[in-house]
Image (cartoon, grey):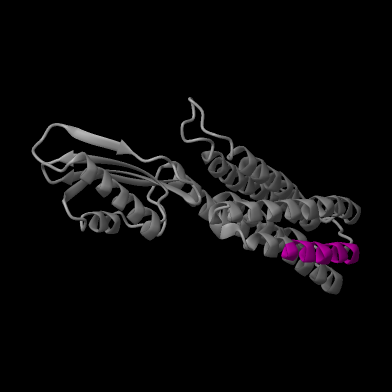
Amino acid sequence: MTAYDELRAQSKRNLRLALSITFLFFIVEVVGGILTNSLALLSDAGHMLTDVLALGMSLFAMWFARRPPTQRHSFGYHRLEIFAALLNGLTLIGVSLYIFIEAYHRLQSPPEVAGTPMLIIALAGLVVNLVNSYILHRSKEHSLNVRGAYLHVLGDTLGSVGAVAAGVIMITTGWMYADPLFSVVIGIIIIASSFHLLRGTVHVLMQGTPEGIKPQEVRDAIQKFVHVRDTHDLHIWTLTNGIEAMTVHINADRGLSLEEQDRLIHQVQRLTREEFGIQHTTIQVELAHEEKECCIVNEMQP
């Protein structure tokens, strides 16, 4: 099993565990929010429901993305994980907008909230969300898909903190405005984190250069090889987190034999894989002052 496969397996285990914990406590928060009449608790439960959907969708995307390529989808289904991350980001914004609308109505006429039961449930929710955040934090750097699920859980953690703070204020002062006001703060934080996720997913979907890879450095490294005169049409993009692809045309010395061209291509392939982490390369060699071109395509190496 490759390092990439090990990371994916670990991510799946973390997602399954977080999904189980989140679903069980979602039920608890819905019941508690209804019984205590707390918007902060119900908004946190609503966000936790989106976490259940987000975690489930992330798991499905990771499973489906492993299907082999087809005639219609020659690169396979790796991009499904990116779409799952995009949908997670959009869902987070939708939940935040709902919280704002409901908070506005409650600010006009704040209802009575059972502060003590709400505080107990919110504290339990905070513990659950902290555990889930820790579980997913270990995998979020390796996948936008997992990062989207992590942001959902992180938003819930902030929601639980807000619900706890609102409960303490209402118990000690009787100020019922604390419930909707803390909900608004939670919504603002969720939207801010969502935009960061959406920016990353859109960058991948627009075939932007992967973070940490500078095309000029790749070009300079290739042009250091013997017989390489120049490079052009260099493109580097991400299929999904952990799988980068590249195409490049290499202008080589005239008279280079097929064996020498093949050797050059394998040298560039090894360089881009070991130095820049690019696994899938398509390299075209063009001999100087000759119309004939030799194109050798390397197989995908996940």
Q: Is residue 276 left or right of residue 54?
A: left
Q: Is residue 154 left or right of residue 178?
A: left
What residue lies at 89% left-to-right and 56% top-to-bottom? 36
Instruction: List the single residue furthest toward the bottom.
Output: 172
Instruction: List the single residue furthest toward the left.
Output: 289
Within the magenta stretch, is there residue 129? yes
Q: Nearer the viewer, residue 230 or 53?
A: 230
Instruction: List the single residue furthest toward the top.
Output: 71
- Indicate whether 152 appears above or below 301: below
- Indicate whether 236 appears above or below 71: below
Where residue 34 appears, as percent x and y from the top left, is 88, 50
- Indicate whether 175 appears above or below 91: below
Within the magenta stretch, is there residue 260? no
What residue lies at 81% left-to-right and 71% top-to-bottom? 168
Where residue 297 appears, as percent x and y from the top left, is 34, 38
Where residue 95 appears, as percent x and y from the top left, is 67, 47
Kindly report the secondary structure that dominates the magenta region of the rendered protein.
helix
Residue 193 in view (yes/no): yes
What residue lies at 49% left-to-right and 30% top-to-bottom? 73
Residue range corresponding to the magenta coloring: 115-131
Instruction: List the single residue furthest toward the front.
Output: 259
Q: Nearer the viewer, residue 150 or 49?
A: 150
Where residue 72 appears, as percent x and y from the top left, is 48, 25
